[in-house]
Amino acid sequence: FGPGVVPASIIMAENVDDFVAGWISGAVATIMTQPFDMAVTRMQASGQKAAFAQLKSLMRLDYSIGAAWRGVGPLLIGTPFNNALIFLGYGMGKRFAETGDESPNSLLPVFVGGCVGGFAQSFTASPIELLKVRLQLSYPAVTSQPAGGLAAAAGGRGFATTSSIVKELTAVGHSHTLPPLLSQGLLATLARDVVPHGVWFASYEAAKVALTPERPPPMPASLGGVVEDGAPPLSTARQLAAGSAAAVAAWGVGYPFDIVKTRCQMSPTALGFAAATAQVWREGGIVGMYNGFGLKMCRAVPMSAIGFLVYERVFATLRRIRGPLE
């Protein structure tokens, strides 16, 4: 192969490593941070501040702390796969930055790779999150629903079930051009997941560079010194810090669209992107667009930090297992 040309076998193997590492990191991070997502969804739906009070009330109704993980089922089906897609885009962008014609360590290919991955996974993320939102906002039909609550079709203890929600969203006679399961909140999901994922990965790479310690000058070769290639590996603490910084940057860009997505997906009728945006803006202007942002960071920061840490560790393990490819 000529200089700068990477064999197809190596590209394929590294793409598989990216996909598997992204899948595992998505599953681990989702399970560990789901209660915060539950609270954020209720706050976004109601426009109120007492999200944890609503979560506590829901736990009493469900007689179980497991209520804090309501809606995690659809996420565990889809989020690891979606995470795998975006990390696949990230890995491809990163390797292009390392071997392509761009300036060394350019963030542009990483940004584009994140955007492409975010776009691809939006079409599966939107219906999965629609189910999640409906499950998280459901209350037993026999109780009075707080602001933002949705009366449930009968399920466990009177709560909605995934099957009852799917049946409702795919029923004939809806007010959408496409079945709501496929279309409701899709545009808002694209707005939330395309550019912000590019920002997420580019910020992560920039944070890693900023947090990478400088190597001490090598000993002269005459004294047995060896010049080491590449940057030194990040410590776990620095790795977590880089993932955390990336989450703040990405959600600073994408969070308003997350609120709009929740409003679109909780609506019993076809509420479009523009109408949902106007609704949130009327309620609180720019402050309303960031309602619950602090609570979102309580989930997004550890989820990003854990996700990147698990991804890097799994990716490195997979490369050790398969050995060098030529």
Image: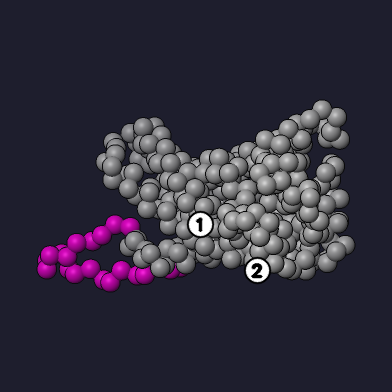
Please report the bounds of the magenta region as a residue range.
209-230
* Quadrant of res 230: bottom left
Task: Name the front one of labels 1 and 2.
Answer: 1
**Where does residue 138 sit, x and y in percent of width and height?**
73, 49
Inspect the magenta stretch and tell me whether residue 7 lies in it.
no
**Lower sequence index among marks 1 and 2:** 1
Label 1 residue SS: helix
Q: From the image, which quarter does the N terminus lie in?
A: top left
The foreground one among 41 and 302 is 41
Give the residue pinned by disc 2. 294
Label 2 residue SS: helix
Residue 169 vertical placement versus 198 (above, below) = above
The foreground one among 289 and 319 is 289
Q: Residue at x 55, y 40 (%)?
A: 77
Report the amino acid beneath label 1.
Met
Residue 24 vertical placement versus 179 (above, below) = below
Magenta stretch: dominant secondary structure: loop
Inspect the magenta stretch and tell me whether residue 217 lies in it.
yes
Residue 297 appears in the figure:
yes
